[in-house]
Image (cartoon, rainbow, N blue to C red):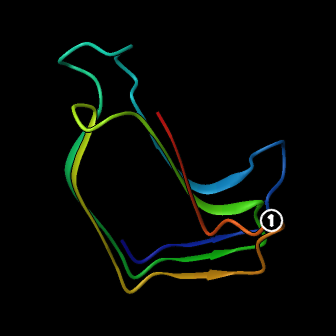
Amino acid sequence: SGNVIANSSGGYSQGIQLDDTGGGTTNGGNRNLLIENNIVHNFKSGLYFQGNSSELSNITLRNNIVQETRSYAIIEHEF
């Protein structure tokens, strides 16, 4: 919370990325998470989520600003 994430470099496409790091096991994923008061500027997309409901759950986005994305997607999600 409270970060400024600006000017993509080194091949990073998303300002904030959450994905299942456990390969689908019960240990992987992101749960009970609050992402708030961040500024994401000049990335392909602002936020990227990868995973299904068992891997990503109870994630709250609040008061974030996404500026000047290089695609139409502010938030991307893949299963």
41 horizontally vs 49: left or right: right
Q: Quadrant of the N terminus?
A: bottom left
| x then y, percent, for residue 76 | 57, 54
Reply above or below: 65 against 26.
Answer: below
| x then y, percent, for residue 75 | 56, 63
8 horizontally vs 29: left or right: right
Q: Residues within 10 Å of mark 1 (few under 14, many from 20)?
A: few
64 horizontally vs 47: left or right: left
| x then y, percent, for residue 69 | 76, 72
Kindly identify the residue that appears in the image at 34 percent across and 17 percent down: 22
Reply above or below: 31 against 66.
Answer: above
What residue does disc 1 label?
71
Kindly identify the residue that appears in the image at 49 percent across and 73 percent down: 3
Q: How many dots with numbers?
A: 1
Q: Secondary structure at mark 1?
A: loop
Q: Name the image quarter holding residue 10.
A: top right
Q: Nearer the viewer, residue 19 or 78?
A: 78
Q: Name the image quarter holding residue 51.
A: top left
| x then y, percent, for residue 79 | 46, 33
Q: Amino acid at mark 1?
A: Ser
26 horizontally vs 6: left or right: left
Kindly identify the residue that appears in the image at 38 percent across and 86 percent down: 63
Reply above or below: 66 against 7.
Answer: below
Kindly identify the residue that appears in the image at 75 percent across and 46 percent down: 12
